[in-house]
Image (cartoon, helix red, strand yellow):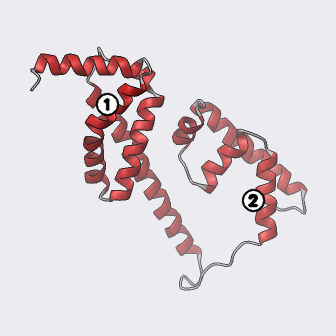
């Protein structure tokens, strides 16, 4: 068994290697602390599938944000727990949005027992075509934000774009999309 000083030195060395881009260090970090991350996520979310997703997202985030790891300012497990808390918060936000949207639809649907009519397939195809015509990365940003209902922070991380850039793409993309759809038969989104 390692002495406490040796354990801390080992963790510091592992943090330095991870921050410098060592894939082997990432694998070792995963091996050591994936169960901790999964346990925290499972206890917080109460759902095995969500806990597994959060665990995966934490280690993807750890790798992509390894440059923010400061081994001399805190422990590696503490840094991972911080990332875990953020990912758990993202899942809770998505759950809230989903339930809010369902409640809003139920409140305006005249007969909640009957399914709402599907939008005209031609209109859906037209909107999809117009989104594609916006170009990249704007089209992908809009798809992730509105079709997949992803938070803007996640989109920024996933596409490796600054958060402000993602927000600009959303705002300008919606304006551009509205303008394009209004040009064709006065259709609005």
Residue closer to the observer: 23 or 130: 23
Q: Residue at x 32, y 55 (%)?
A: 45
Q: Residue at x 53, y 46 (%)?
A: 151
- Inspect this view and state whether residue 70 appears: no
Return the disc, 2 or 1, that comes first in the chain's sequence: 1
Residue linked to disc 2: 189
Residue 35 placement: quadrant: top left
Dot 2 and dot 1 residues touching (CB under 8 Å): no
Considering only vertical position in the picture, is 123 above or below 175?
below
Q: Residue at x 32, y 29 (%)?
A: 79
Q: Horizontal placement of 174 versus 154: left or right? A: right
Q: Quadrant of the N terminus?
A: top left
Position of residue 184 measured from the top left corner of the image (x, y, whole percent): 90, 59
Residue linked to disc 1: 28
Residue closer to the observer: 93 or 140: 140
Residue 139 placement: quadrant: top right
Q: Horizontal placement of 153 versus 8: left or right? A: right
Q: Which mark is residue 97?
A: none
Q: Quadrant of the C terminus?
A: bottom right
Position of residue 155 measured from the top left corner of the image (x, y, whole percent): 57, 41
SS at circle 1: helix
- Inspect this view and state whether residue 57 appears: yes
């Amino acid at each position: 068994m390692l002495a406490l000083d040796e354990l801390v030195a080992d963790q510091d060395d592992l943090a330095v290697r991870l921050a410098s881009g060592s894939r082997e260090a990432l694998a070792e970090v995963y091996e050591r602390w994936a169960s901790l991350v999964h346990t925290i996520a499972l206890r917080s979310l109460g759902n095995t599938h969500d806990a597994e997703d959060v665990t995966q997202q934490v280690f993807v985030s750890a790798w992509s944000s390894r440059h923010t790891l400061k081994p001399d300012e805190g422990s590696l497990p503490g840094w991972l727990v911080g990332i875990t808390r953020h990912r758990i918060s993202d899942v809770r936000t998505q759950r809230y949005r989903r339930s809010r949207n369902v409640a809003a639809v139920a409140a305006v649907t005249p007969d909640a027992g009957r399914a709402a009519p599907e939008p005209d397939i031609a209109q859906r195809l037209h909107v999809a075509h117009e989104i594609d015509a916006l170009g990249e990365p704007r089209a992908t940003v809009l798809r992730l934000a509105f079709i997949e209902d992803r938070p803007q922070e996640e989109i920024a991380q996933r596409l490796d774009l600054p958060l402000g850039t993602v927000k600009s793409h959303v705002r300008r993309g919606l304006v551009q999309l509205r303008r394009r759809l209004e040009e064709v038969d006065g259709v609005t989104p």
